[in-house]
């Protein structure tokens, strides 16, 4: 080995990082068995920070610029190495570079519906997904709490952890905002702001800054969406249960007509009349059960088949949660008496 090769192997004059790979948050300069000599230059580019670590202890940190390494520019390292006025040259130290650029279009989402407390519903199970951006804000915390002595650390290495943090704080976002789920779902910008506020401190604990969060979709599982649609339908017809039952009957008329077997105009008219009559009977019966008042139709005017049809419809409403078990049982007993 020649003298020039020996010198190149032993000493480092310029320390820098060109960030040739996207998504890298931390990179350790590969000294191998080489050493830094007095007066070497540290080059830190825009959106970078360099950190000196001596025997596991964090020392001096440098921002963008060219820095000549002396006892004046390395006060903490000088103290750790017990250099007084004499700069030991050459010397060894770990140098870590950190990228502080925004890491964009990172994805988050729920793999399974999660249960959230809600002001209106008490609890709902929701799915949600979107994206977020973050940046490395505190290299010291990131080095000690996350990266440690690894040669490099990327956004991909943190992906699962950060997505988990966002999903974990979805419940906090809804509860902390005090806004009902339906209002948050209708205003995804507000939902995103609430999620960012609830998650910021968890990112800071890792030395990161959560710059933005977007919510692209919020949805309910199919079975809960049907219940919500039912509730919306009730809201559209108001608090009048009779109108709601008539609305339900009207929705069933196409099925009734299709099952008439092609009876022509007379059959269609008969089916329509039966459907409307059934709707009126059910409306009167349910309102009587819920309000405790007498129905406008006398008991004798209700045929047995109408009573059975009403019971079947009441059972369906109970299954959907529109009627409680107590309301259904009371109405059932009342209707069965009319069969005797």
Image (cartoon, rainbow, N blue to C red):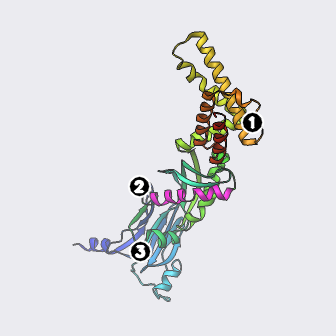
In the drawing, what numbered circle is on residue 224?
A: none
Which numbered disc, 2 or 1, marks the residue that appears first in the sequence? Answer: 2
Q: Is residue 161 magenta?
A: yes
Structural crowding at the residue carrying mark 1, measured as other residues with C-alpha within 10 Å and reported as few (<14), some (14–19) or many (≥20): few
Q: Farthest residue to the front: give it.
A: 340
Q: Position of residue 276 (x, y in %)?
A: 67, 23
In the drawing, what numbered circle is on residue 94?
A: 3
In the drawing, what numbered circle is on residue 21?
A: 2
Structural crowding at the residue carrying mark 3, measured as other residues with C-alpha within 10 Å and reported as few (<14), some (14–19) or many (≥20): some
Task: Give the extent of the magenta segment.
Answer: 159-177
Q: CA distance from mark 2 to mark 3?
A: 21 Å
Q: Please, what is the dominant secondary structure of the magenta stretch?
A: helix
Q: Is residue 229 left or right of residue 284?
A: left
Q: Is residue 75 magenta?
A: no
Q: Is residue 302 left or right of residue 156?
A: right
Residue underneath mark 1: 240
Q: Farthest residue to the left: give it.
A: 1
Q: Nearer the viewer, residue 216 or 133?
A: 216
Q: Secondary structure at mark 1?
A: loop
């Amino acid at each position: 080995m020649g003298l020039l090769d020996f010198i190149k192997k032993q000493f480092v004059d310029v320390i820098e990082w060109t960030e040739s790979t996207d998504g890298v948050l931390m990179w350790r300069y590969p000294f191998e068995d080489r050493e830094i000599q007095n007066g070497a230059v540290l080059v830190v580019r825009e959106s970078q920070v360099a950190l000196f670590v001596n025997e596991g202890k964090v020392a001096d940190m440098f921002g963008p610029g060219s820095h000549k390494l002396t006892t004046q520019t390395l006060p903490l390292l000088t103290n750790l190495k017990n250099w007084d006025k004499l700069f030991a040259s050459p010397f060894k130290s770990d140098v870590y570079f950190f990228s502080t650029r925004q890491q964009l279009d990172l994805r988050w989402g729920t793999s399974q519906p999660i249960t959230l407390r809600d002001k209106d519903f008490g609890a709902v199970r929701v799915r949600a997904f979107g994206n977020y951006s973050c940046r490395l804000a505190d290299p010291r915390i990131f080095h000690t709490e996350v990266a440690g002595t690894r040669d490099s650390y990327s956004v991909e290495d943190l992906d699962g952890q950060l997505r988990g943090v966002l999903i974990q704080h979805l419940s906090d976002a809804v509860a902390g905002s005090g806004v009902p789920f339906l209002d948050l779902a209708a205003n995804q910008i507000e939902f995103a702001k609430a999620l960012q506020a609830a998650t910021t401190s968890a990112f800071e604990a890792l030395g990161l800054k959560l710059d933005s969060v977007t919510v692209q979709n919020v949805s309910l599982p199919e079975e809960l969406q049907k219940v919500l649609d039912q509730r919306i339908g009730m809201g559209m017809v108001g608090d009048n249960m009779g109108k709601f039952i008539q609305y339900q009957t009207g929705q069933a008329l196409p099925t009734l007509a299709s099952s008439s077997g092609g009876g022509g105009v007379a059959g269609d008219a008969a089916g329509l009349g039966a459907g409307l009559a059934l709707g009126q009977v059910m409306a009167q019966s349910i309102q009587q059960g819920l309000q405790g008042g007498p129905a406008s139709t006398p008991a004798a005017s209700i045929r047995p088949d109408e009573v059975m049809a009403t019971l079947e419809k009441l059972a369906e409403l109970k299954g959907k949660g529109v009627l409680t078990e107590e309301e259904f049982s009371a109405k059932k007993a009342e209707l069965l008496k009319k069969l005797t």
